[in-house]
Amino acid sequence: MWKSSLYSCSSRADYTQYCLKRVSNRFRYWDPSSLGYRFLAEAKRLWELSTVKNPELVIVQSLLVMNIVLNLHGLDKHGDVYGRLGLVMAERMGLFDGDEHISSLRERHARNFTAWCLFDTDTLDYYIVLMQICQPFVQDLWVKGTNFQSIVNDCQRDINILLRLYYIRHSFTGADSWLTNPLAKLGFMTLQRIPETTNPQDLHYLRSGLILALLGLREQGRNYYISRTVYYIIRNQLQPEEEHLLQGTEDPETAADESPGMVGEVQSAWVPRVVNISVDLAVEDLTKLAEQYLTLESSGPTGDGGSGSGSTNLA
C-alpha cells in the first residue's frame, strides 16, 4: 500500500507544484502551506519509513520523479541521491537486461518505459563524462583545420532559432522544464557577446535574443524555482540599455513580481552557462553563481551584484 502512496505523492508533488496555473507563487517549494510541499514531504516520509527488501517498478518510478522535482527546485545535490537509489534498484531488477522473460505485455511496456526514462534523465550527464574520457585520446589529425569558433557560432545560432520558433508556436507561458537549459545558455551567451559587439545589426540581434531568453526564464520561473534563479542572475548583470528594453516588456503581473520573495537556498551542481574547457566547473555551477549575484535575507551581499541593477534580495 505504501508503494502506491509513494508514487501518488511524488507525482502529485510534481503536478501541483508546477502545472496548476491557478496556484500563485507555485515556485515557492519551501512554503509549508503549498500542495507541492505537502505531497513531497509525505513522499519523503514514506520513503524514510520504508524497508525495501525487493525492488519494484513503482518504487523506481517514484524515486525518479522525486529526483526530477528536487532538480527543478535547484536542489539537484539532494535530488540526485534519490535518482541514484532508483538506478541501483533498476539494475537489481535487470531493467536494462532485456524483457524476453516478461510474459505480460503491459508489464513489459512499463519496464521499457521506465528504463528509457532513466536513460533519458542521465544521458546528458553521460555525454559530458564521455567527452572528458575521450579528450586525451583525440589526435590532432582529427581536428586539423577545424574552425572551433565557427562550430560555436553555429550552435549559438541554432539555439537562438529553435527558441524563437518555439516561442512563436507555443509561447513560454506553459510549464516546460526542458526550456530552462537552452534559455539559460542563450541568455548567458548573448550577455557575454553584447559588450564585444559594435555592429548595430549584430547588436540588435543579440539584444533580441537576450530579451527572448529573459522572457522565457521569467515565465518559466513562475513554475520552477531553478528558472527563476537563473532569470535574476542574468538580470542582475544587465547594462542600462538592455535593462531598459526588458522593462518595456513588463505587464501588470510582472510589475507585481518585482519583489521576488525567494528564500530558498540553491544547492545545484548544474553549470548553466557555456564556459571555456580550461575553466573549473566547480566555480561555475548554479550555487556559486547564486552566491555571487544574489543575496539571501539572512546574509549580507555575497557578491558585487554584477554591473547592472545590483544584487537582488531573495527574501
Image: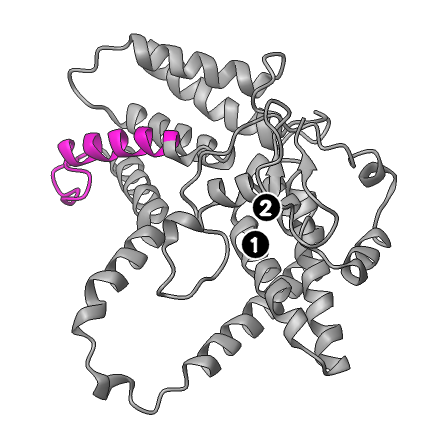
**Mark drawn on residue 230:** 2
Which residue is at a point 31% across and 30% down the rendered structure image?
81
| 267 sits left or right of 134 in the view | right
Q: Pointer 1: residues within 10 angstroms few (<14), some, or many (20+)?
A: many
Rendered position, 116 above or below 57 = below
* Kind of residue at disc 1: Ala
Q: Which residues are magenta?
A: 78-103
* Kind of residue at disc 2: Val
**Mark drawn on residue 184:** 1
Rendered position, 244 above or below 203 = above
Q: Is residue 97 magenta?
A: yes
Name the quadrant of the C terminus: top right
Asked if the residues shown at circle 1 and circle 2 are in contact, with their CB atoms under 8 angstroms apart, the answer is yes
Does any portion of residue 171 appear in the rendered image?
Answer: no
Query: What whole-number distance in Å separates the C-alpha atoms at marks 1 and 2?
Result: 7 Å
Q: Position of residue 67 (x, y in %)?
A: 39, 32
Name the quadrant of the N terminus: top left
Residue situated in front as seen by the camera: 202 or 253: 202
